[in-house]
Amino acid sequence: MPPAVLLSLAHHAEPIERVSPAQLHDLWRLYQEEWWTKGRTLDETRRAVEGAQLLFGYQEKRTGKLVGFTRVLTDFVVTGLVMDVIVAREWRGTGMGKALIDRVVGHPQLRRNKRLELYCRRELIPFYEKWGFQTASGPVVPMRRLQEG
């Protein structure tokens, strides 16, 4: 990444670990722009944020607007599940996604976990492989049960 892009990120956005009520609305709006989160209600967004053990975000310094976010569900021992890595469209290509994942994998409490997991589209696999994420192989496969309601 060119230093100018990282410099721009550092000068125009700052990391956060909590989401204000206004930023909760920003997050909900970001969710409405993505196929995998479109349709989440504001209440579901609030409950998902409240249920996460760790939050990682970036806000614009000038406005306080949330422009990058991810959350982690974890037991702080065995597994941490990285969820909802999302960057506002106008901030893509600035290194914010990299900065979010750097913060996750470098977090002192998560470094003690035996593993971190995430779900992503196939085209994003090379992005996450830079941090050592691998596609599932071996005798264990992820399973999912969809619930109504």
Image (spheres, rainbow, N blue to C red):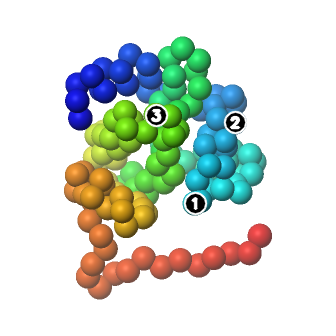
Q: Position of residue 54 (x, y in %)?
A: 48, 42
Residue that carries the numbered disc 3 in the rendered image? 91
Q: Position of residue 20 (x, y in %)?
A: 64, 28
Q: Report the disc number at residue 25.
A: 2
Let me know if residue 67 appears in the view: yes
Q: Report the disc number at residue 36.
A: 1
Amino acid, disc 3: Trp
Near mark 2 (Cα within 10 A), the count class, few <14, some 14-19 or many ≥20, is some
Amino acid, disc 1: Trp
Q: Indicate the secondary structure of the residue bearing disc 1.
A: loop
Q: Is residue 1 above or below residue 78?
A: above
Tell whether label 1 touches label 3 (CB within 8 Å): no
Q: Residue at x 62, y 49 (%)?
A: 33
Q: Earlier in the sequence, mark 3 or mark 1?
A: 1
Q: Indicate the secondary structure of the residue bearing disc 3.
A: helix
Near mark 3 (Cα within 10 A), the count class, few <14, some 14-19 or many ≥20, is some
CA–CA distance between discs 3 and 1? Answer: 19 Å
CA–CA distance between discs 1 and 2? Answer: 17 Å
Q: Residue at x 55, y 48 (%)?
A: 52
Q: Position of residue 111 (x, y in %)?
A: 28, 46
Q: Residue at x 37, y 38 (%)?
A: 93
Comparing 111 with 137, the one in front is 137
